[in-house]
C-alpha cells in the first residue's frame, strides 16, 4: 500500500493507533557518548550484575532492536531502547497519527479507499507485555525515564527481566546460554507458545551465527558465534503460555519456523452481480508463480484484517504483524489475490503485506517481522521455484503501471526505509560483487545506516523527514549534486525529494547497465536517459555485477516498453476478449542497455466472473523480457531486442 502522510489515520487497532507517529525526543539521549564501545560494555556489565549469559542478553536485544536505540523514540507497542522495554501508556501520550492511502483492487484502473475508524482509548489496565518497563524499574531501582532514554540503563533493565523470568520458571541463573530458552520465550511478550518459540528460535539462531554491526547511535557491538549451541526447548512447556490453536493454523501454507494462522479472505458474490475479493485459480499448475511482492499496510493489524475479510475490498495472500512477526494467511497460493494494481503481476505473484507505515520505519519495521518475512519468502521461493533476487522479489514500488494513465497512481511502499540489504542477508542471498571494477553492470548496494538522502513529507507535506538510513540512492541528470534530479516522463511532474516520489531513486539490490563514469560518479541507463549517482570507491553506493542485459535489435532506433506481458491478439480463443497491448510513455532507445530479470511468455488470466468454469489462462507466441527500466520493472518484446551477457 502507498504511504500518504497527509491522509487521516486508517483502520486501526484499538490499543496501538496513538503510537504510530511517536517522534524521537528532542533531547540528546542521556547515554550519548563518543566512545563507540560504550554499549558493548553495558551488555557485559549488565550480564555480570544479573547473572545472565552475555550471549543471551545480546541475542535477545538483537531480535528486539538490532541493538538500536532509535533516539529514544518508542516502537508501535511503546517499546524503548535496545531491549525494547515497553511502556505503552507513556508512549501513547501526545503521539501523532499517521495515515495512508488505499490499495488497488483487481482492475488495473480502479482504486478503493481504506476504511477509516476512530481511535479508541486504551484499557484501564494494559497487558503485561505492554508494561515491561515499569517492572524493570522495580527490579533495578532505575527511573523509568532513564530506562527509556539511557541505553545502558535499558540494557540493565532487560537483564533484570530475563533473570526474573528465569527464576519464575524455577531455573538456575546458569552461565550456559542453552539453559535460558524458556526465559527468552517469556521475554518475547507473546501470549501463545508458537509465537514465543519463533522468537526464542530466532534469538538462538543469532547466537549460533553471531552478529556484528554499528548501531544507529554509532556504537559498535559484536556477538561471537556459538555454532554448536543447542538450547533446552523443553522449557517452553513450563512457560505458562497458551498452546497455539491447531484449528487456526490448519490449511496454512507457512514454514514450521513461524507462527501462522488462517484468516480467509472471502470469495463471495455481493451487490448487483459483483464478487470479491480474489479469484480462484490453479497456479502451480496452469500458471507459474514468478514474483513475491513486498508491501506495507499503511494501516494497523486489526483494521487491516477487517479489510481483507470484506468481500467488497481487495486482498493479498499474507499479512505479517509488526510486534512479533506473526503471520495471517488469507488467500491460497494457487489463487489470485488483488494486491498489486497490475493484473499481470497479480496473476503471477504472491503478495505479502507487512504491518507498518513507510514514513515511520523504526516504530514498525521490526527485526521480528523482517525475520518472519524472510522465513516465509524462503519457503515460498523454494516451493514455487522463485529466484531470490530483486527481479523476482519486488517491492510494491517496483510494480509498473499498466497504461500511461495508471502510472501516477501506482504505489510506493515499502518505501526508502525498508532495509533490502538486511532482508536479503536474512534470505541467504546477500548482494555481493560478482564482476570486476569496470563491469558494465552494477548492483545498487549502499551502506544502509550511512546512506541518508534527504526526504520530505514524512509528517507534513514539504517538510524535511528526520535523518535516517535508507536503501535508496538519488539520481541526478549530471555528475553533480546541484544538477537537476532525473525526471520520470510517465509522471509528468517535476521530480521532488518527497518520500513517495520515485522519479529519481534506485533501490538496493536493483541492477542497472552502466552508461558512463566520471571520477566518483557512475551513470546508468534509467527511464531512457543517463542517470548519475555518487559512487566513491571508499563508500560505494553500488558494486560491480555480472548478468544479462538487452539492447534494441540492430536497425531499430527504439522499442516500446510495456507494463504487462500480454499475448498477441491471435492467441485469444473466441470466448475471451483480446486485451490491448498498450505501450507505456517510454522508449528503449538504440545504444541503451537494461538489466534482465527473466524471459516470460505473453500470458493473460481471464477471470472476470464468479463462475470459476469461465476462467481461462491464455498463452501466446510472443515472448517478453522483464527488465529493470526505472525504479519499477517493465517488459519488452524479446523479438525487439538483443540479449547479451556482461561479465
Image: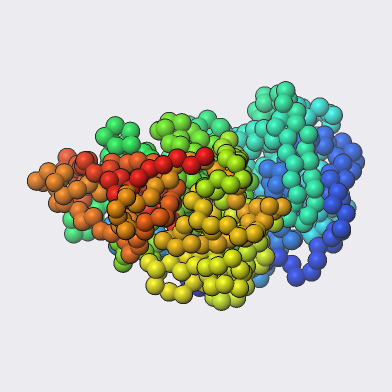
- The quarter of the image holding the N terminus is bottom left
Where 300 sits versus 619, above or below?
Answer: below
Residue 524 shows up from this direction: yes
At 65% from the left and 36% from the top, the residue drawn is 202
Which residue is situated farthest in the left direction here?
A: 574
Q: Nearer the viewer, residue 510 or 297?
A: 510
Looking at the image, what colour scheme do you see?
A: rainbow
Quadrant location of residue 244? top right
How far from the left and from the top, in percent, is residue 75?
65, 56
Specify whether 598 is left or right of 84: left
Quadrant location of residue 603? top left
Q: Nearer the viewer, residue 253 or 186?
A: 253
Where 584 sits versus 266, above or below?
Answer: below
Residue 130 shows up from this direction: no
Specify whether 629 is left or right of 607: right
Q: Nearer the viewer, residue 517 or 506?
A: 517
At 18% from the left and 55% from the top, the residue drawn is 273
Where 208 sits versus 19, above or below?
Answer: above
How far from the left and from the top, in percent, is residue 79?
69, 54
How far from the left and from the top, in percent, is residue 362?
64, 57
At 69% from the left and 49% from the top, the residue drawn is 65
At 54% from the left and 54% from the top, the residue drawn is 507
Quadrant location of residue 16? bottom right
Amino acid at each position: 500500500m502507498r504511504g500518504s502522510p497527509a491522509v487521516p489515520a486508517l483502520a486501526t487497532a484499538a490499543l496501538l493507533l496513538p503510537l504510530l507517529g511517536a517522534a524521537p525526543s528532542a533531547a540528546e539521549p542521556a547515554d550519548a557518548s563518543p566512545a563507540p564501545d560504550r554499549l558493548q560494555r553495558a551488555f557485559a556489565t549488565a550480564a555480570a550484575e544479573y547473572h545472565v549469559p552475555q550471549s543471551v542478553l545480546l541475542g535477545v536485544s538483537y531480535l528486539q532492536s538490532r541493538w538500536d536505540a532509535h533516539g529514544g523514540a518508542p516502537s508501535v507497542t511503546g517499546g524503548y531502547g535496545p531491549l525494547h522495554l515497553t511502556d505503552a501508556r507513556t508512549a501513547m501520550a501526545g503521539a501523532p497519527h499517521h495515515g495512508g492511502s488505499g490499495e488497488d483492487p483487481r482492475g488495473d484502473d480502479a482504486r478503493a479507499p481504506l476504511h477509516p475508524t476512530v481511535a479508541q482509548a486504551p484499557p484501564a489496565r494494559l497487558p503485561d507485555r505492554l508494561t515491561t518497563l515499569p517492572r524493570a524499574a522495580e527490579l533495578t531501582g532505575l527511573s523509568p525515564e532513564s530506562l527509556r532514554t539511557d541505553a545502558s540503563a535499558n540494557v540493565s533493565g532487560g537483564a533484570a527481566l530475563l533473570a526474573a523470568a528465569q527464576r519464575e520458571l524455577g531455573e538456575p541463573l546458569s552461565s550456559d546460554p542453552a539453559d535460558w530458552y524458556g526465559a527468552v520465550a517469556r521475554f518475547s511478550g507473546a501470549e501463545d507458545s508458537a509465537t514465543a518459540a519463533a522468537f526464542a528460535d530466532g534469538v538462538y539462531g543469532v547466537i549460533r551465527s553471531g552478529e556484528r554491526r554499528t548501531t544507529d547511535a554509532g556504537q559498535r557491538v559484536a556477538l561471537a558465534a556459538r555454532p554448536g549451541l543447542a538450547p533446552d526447548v523443553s522449557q517452553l512447556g513450563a512457560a505458562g503460555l497458551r498452546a497455539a490453536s491447531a484449528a487456526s493454523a490448519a490449511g496454512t501454507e507457512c514454514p514450521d519456523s513461524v507462527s501462522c494462522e488462517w484468516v480467509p479472505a472471502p470469495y463471495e458474490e455481493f451487490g448487483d452481480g459483483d464478487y470479491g475479493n480474489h479469484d480462484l485459480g490453479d497456479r502451480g499448475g496452469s500458471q507459474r508463480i514468478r514474483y513475491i511482492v513486498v508491501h506495507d499496510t499503511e494501516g494497523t493489524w486489526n483494521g487491516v484484517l477487517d479489510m481483507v475479510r470484506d468481500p467488497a475490498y481487495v486482498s493479498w495472500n499474507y499479512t505479517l504483524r509488526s510486534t512479533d512477526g506473526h503471520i495471517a494467511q488469507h488467500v491460497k497460493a494457487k489463487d489470485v489475490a488483488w494486491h498489486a494494481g497490475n493484473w499481470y503481476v497479480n496473476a503471477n505473484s504472491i503478495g505479502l503485506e507487512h504491518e507498518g507505515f513507510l514514513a515511520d520505519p523504526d516504530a514498525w519495521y521490526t527485526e521480528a517481522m523482517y525475520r518472519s518475512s524472510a522465513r516465509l519468502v524462503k519457503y515460498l521461493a523454494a516451493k514455487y521455484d522463485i529466484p531470490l533476487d530483486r527481479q523476482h522479489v519486488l517491492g510494491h514500488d517496483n510494480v509498473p503501471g499498466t497504461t500511461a494513465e495508471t502510472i501516477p497512481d501506482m504505489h510506493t511502499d515499502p518505501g526508502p526505509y525498508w532495509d533490502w540489504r538486511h532482508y536479503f542477508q536474512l534470505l541467504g542471498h546477500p548482494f555481493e560483487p560478482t564482476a570486476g571494477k569496470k563491469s558494465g553492470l552494477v548492483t545498487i548496494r549502499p551502506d544502509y545506516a550511512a546512506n541518508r538522502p534527504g526526504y520530505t513529507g514524512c509528517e507534513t507535506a514539504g517538510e524535511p523527514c528526520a535523518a535516517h538510513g535508507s536503501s535508496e540512492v538519488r539520481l541526478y541528470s549530471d555528475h553533480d549534486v546541484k544538477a537537476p534530479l532525473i525526471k520520470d516522463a510517465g509522471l509528468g511532474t517535476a521530480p521532488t525529494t518527497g518520500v513517495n516520489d520515485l522519479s529519481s531513486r534506485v533501490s538496493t539490490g536493483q541492477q542497472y547497465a552502466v552508461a558512463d563514469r566520471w571520477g566518483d560518479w557512475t551513470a546508468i541507463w534509467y527511464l531512457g536517459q543517463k542517470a548519475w549517482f555518487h559512487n566513491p570507491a571508499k563508500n560505494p553506493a553500488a558494486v560491480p555485477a555480472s548478468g544479462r542485459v538487452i539492447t534494441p535489435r540492430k536497425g531499430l532506433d527504439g522499442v516500446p516498453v510495456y507494463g504487462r506481458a500480454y499475448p498477441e491478439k491471435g492467441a485469444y480463443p473466441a470466448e475471451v476478449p483480446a486485451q490491448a497491448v498498450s505501450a507505456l510513455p517510454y522508449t528503449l532507445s538504440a545504444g541503451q542497455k537494461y538489466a534482465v530479470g527473466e524471459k516470460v511468455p505473453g500470458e493473460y488470466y481471464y477471470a472476470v466472473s464468479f463462475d470459476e468454469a469461465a476462467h481461462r489462462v491464455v498463452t501466446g507466441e510472443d515472448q517478453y523480457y522483464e527488465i529493470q527500466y526505472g525504479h519499477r520493472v517493465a517488459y519488452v518484446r524479446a523479438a525487439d531486442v538483443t540479449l547479451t551477457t556482461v561479465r
